[in-house]
Image (cartoon, helix red, strand yellow):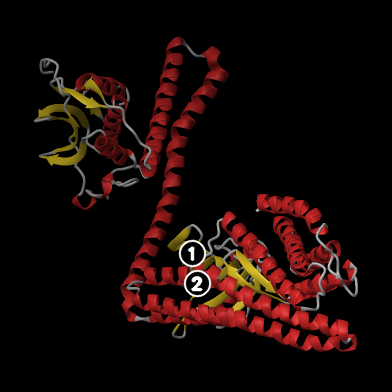
Amino acid sequence: MALLGAVTAVFILMLIPVVEDLPTTPRAIALPWFVLAPLFTLAELAIVHFRFRRDAHSFSLSDVPLVIGLFLADTTALVTAFVVGSLVALVVVRHQRGLKLWFNVVEFAAQALVAHAVFKLIVGTSDPLGLPGWIGAFAATAAAFAVADALVTAAIRLTGGVVSPTELASVVVFGLIAGAINTGLALLLVTIFLLHPESAWLALVPTAILFIAYRAYTEQRDERARIEALYEMTLALHAAPVIEDAVAAAAQGARELFEVEAVHVVLLSDGPLSYRTAATAGGVEVMNPVFFDRSHGRWPEVVTATEGSIVTVTDKRDWEGLSPKPSSTLMVAPLLAGDRHSGLIIVADPLSDVGSFNERDLKILETLAGRLGVSLENGRLEDSLSEVTRLKERLEELVASKDQFIASVSHELRTPLTVIVGLAQELRNSRELLGPDELDEFLDHIYEQSHELGNIIEDLLIAARADIGTLVVKPAEIDVVEALDTVLVTHARKVTASKSIDPVARGTSQRVMVDPLRFRQIIRNLITNALRYGGANVWVEVESVGDTVEVAVVDDGEGVPPESLEEIFQPYGRAAGGRANPSWVGLGLSVSLQLARLMGGDLQYRRAGDHTRFVVTLPRASVDEPAMADR
């Protein structure tokens, strides 16, 4: 728009000397610009709009003072009066600022200049009150309209708006008819003023009637369009099989109907959790849970109201969960399902800067809310409401699970960290009193606890990456027994008097295609799981099965209860009734399953006799190394 305004301004500067050199039309009176300017101000106040979302084609009675200026003012006075008079109306009354104001100023100047050029070319030195003057006046106003329409249409398209050929044709037809009527009225006014100036006031009556007719036409046009849109939305609501479709259709339809930034349909519940469907420029978000306190801000007023209202946002906190912009204008209508207040429709911010909500808009919104309320009350939506209730309960469970998980993570991270800090502080304060063996023991404990802390953090990172889809593996050909030995030796140093772990894998050496780092992480998690939850004795077995290799972490414990078989592989899940420390995070099996599947394998729980087996299935490498002797 800035570039378009600049190009127009250059065009004006180039056209001014050309127009001034044209033959001067005789005039009985030479009006100064400051006498003519108030007429343009009044004309800009009597304005009607054809709205197209954020932009609009505007029509005023400015043709009347323009024609008067063509007959009674020179080029400089006419352009100055048009610009100054219209500028006052735009700044003082319509509060325009910035780029849009600049664009309108150059548009007005271009209209006045082109109109005077056409008028002088046609009339020349002839009598302006004769036939040439009448033809020149009609041609001049038509040229001014063409300039304005071309500039406004170009600005709409440059700013991303769309004007369909049908809409543009409607604008052109209305503009030309209105311009012709305005011009005829202005010619009558000029003729009366020059021949019988004492009777000029009589022209004010048809001028006022003409403005009322314009305004009535545009209001009727908008009203008809909205009634048609409301009818289409009613059909869409009746066709919606479930509540999600119904509220989405209502939100999107209301946004198009009222040409606004956003529409929110809020379905209320008995608790603090409700469900919001929002239609914005980015699309429709359906049934998102939102929290708001109905005892705070404007919510009590709109939740209990049985009639709609138009409000202005002064504090965003008054509309918790919606996040409107400051100074936003909202229309709010209640959703009444029978005698129950079941929700709200909130319409926010007209797209067009010439638009604002009025009582007719509010009545239409209330009608739409009534249609949606009937749909909510309809028995065909009961299944969807049950689903919403289930989702609500699931969300509440997730919130509780999140709190429990945060507490568990905090405890498990704090345990090794406390040991590390305590031992480091002891070393710092009593290093001279400790012998070499004691120093080695302290350092071993610090190393082991640091390693444990790193393992916990790695599991958390793996779980987070898996959730957002960024977890990757880097397969390589490895000897599975050699990789197992590294993990087993590390864990063998950690066992207590009540636990025993075989430091050597049982089976034959096999070559597999896996990510070495992730494979060791899986085995580490499974051994840790066995030492925490399993029996007194833990060992690892390796077996070749077809095109795969199975690595089993085995213990002689009681195993997993049947009712917990699905839960143990869920994030943060543990076996019911197990001997687990309630502070442990419970991510090991979930992370291990995800890693195994990413590497083309699997992880399964099996119970064989008195033994519990967690079996990792891995893809065999394409070429096997010679098998080693059984261990």
- Give the residue drawn at x 35%, y 73%: 240
- Give the residue drawn at x 38%, y 68%: 244
Observer-nearest residue: 514 or 177?
Answer: 177
> Element at badge 2?
helix
| Whether residue 198 can be seen here | yes
Residue at the outermost front position = 126
Residue at the outermost top position = 436
User: What amino acid type should be assigned to the residue bearing mark 1?
Assistant: Ala
Residue 629 position, x and y percent, is: 10, 15
Residue 28 position, x and y percent, is: 90, 75
The answer to whether residue 109 is above or below residue 181 is above
User: What amino acid type should be assigned to the residue bearing mark 2?
Assistant: Ala
Alpha carbons under labels 2 and 1: distance apart: 9 Å
- Give the residue drawn at x 44%, y 85%: 338
| Whether residue 583 can be seen here | no
> Element at badge 1?
strand
Residue 426 position, x and y percent, is: 53, 22
- Which residue is label 2 attached to? 254
Image quarter of residue 472: top left
Look at the numbered discs 2 and 1 and tell me whether their residues touch, using CB distance below 8 Å: yes
Image quarter of residue 598: top left
- Which residue is label 1 attached to? 279
Can you tell which mark lies on residue 561?
A: none
The answer to whether residue 184 is above or below residue 468 is below
Tell me if 605 is positioned left or right of 206 in this view.
left
Observer-nearest residue: 43 or 306?
Answer: 43
Residue 505 position, x and y percent, is: 19, 23
Q: Are there few (<14), some (14-19), or many (20+) residues within 10 Å of tag 1?
A: many
The answer to whether residue 473 is above or below residue 463 is above
Quadrant where the C terminus sits is top left
Task: Name which of mark 2 and mark 1 comes first in the sequence.
Answer: 2
